Image (spheres, rainbow, N blue to C red):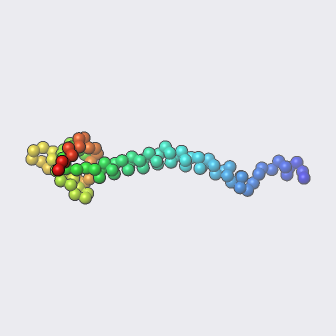
């Protein structure tokens, strides 16, 4: 065995792993810093949109404030003032400002 053969770098599985581990590390960082928080935020938004009920005071994405008077599967009708009612997609709701009091029976 010569000196040149002993100095050759290791090849095979160990060599491939040494080339791939930086990509695995980058994916893990992206997952925990970008993907996972975005999924959590989307779940919270979906839960908020599903909890809208009549009487809730809401704010739309465009900044319009109003009170929910009617609900459908994908639309929300809000009362802006005494005479004006507007229909929006449910996805246009940005936040619930004040929840309606719970109905007692």
Q: Can residue 94 be seen in this view?
A: yes
Residue at the spot 50% in from the left edge and 45% down from the top edge: 32
Residue 92 x, y percent position in the rendering: 27, 50
* Residue 87 in sight: no
From this viewpoint, which residue is outermost toward the left?
A: 83
Where is residue 97 drawn, in percent x and y? 24, 41
Of all residues, the one furthest to the bottom in this rendering is: 73
Q: Which residue lies furthest to the top in this view?
A: 97
In this rendering, would 35 be left or right of 85?
A: right
Q: Give how far across and how far down residue 64 sits, in percent.
A: 21, 43
> In the image, 95: left or right of 70?
right
Q: How many marks?
A: 0
Which residue is rendered at x = 90% and y = 53% of the image? Answer: 1
Name the residue at 12% across, 43% down: 81
Left or right of 47 in this view: 64: left
Q: Which of 102 and 40 is in front in this view?
A: 102
Point out residue 93 in the picture as x, y percentages from the top left corner: 27, 48
The part of the image, by quadrant, that contains residue 101 is: top left
């Amino acid at each position: 065995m010569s000196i040149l053969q002993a100095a050759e770098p290791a090849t095979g599985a160990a060599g491939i792993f040494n080339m791939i581990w930086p990509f695995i590390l980058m994916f893990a960082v992206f997952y925990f810093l970008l993907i996972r928080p975005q999924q959590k935020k989307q779940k919270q938004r979906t839960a908020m949109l599903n909890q809208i009920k009549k009487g809730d005071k809401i704010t739309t994405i465009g900044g319009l404030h109003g009170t929910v008077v009617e609900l459908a599967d994908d639309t929300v009708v809000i009362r802006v003032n005494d005479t004006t009612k507007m229909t929006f997609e449910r996805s246009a709701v940005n936040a619930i400002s004040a929840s309606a009091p719970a109905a007692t029976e």
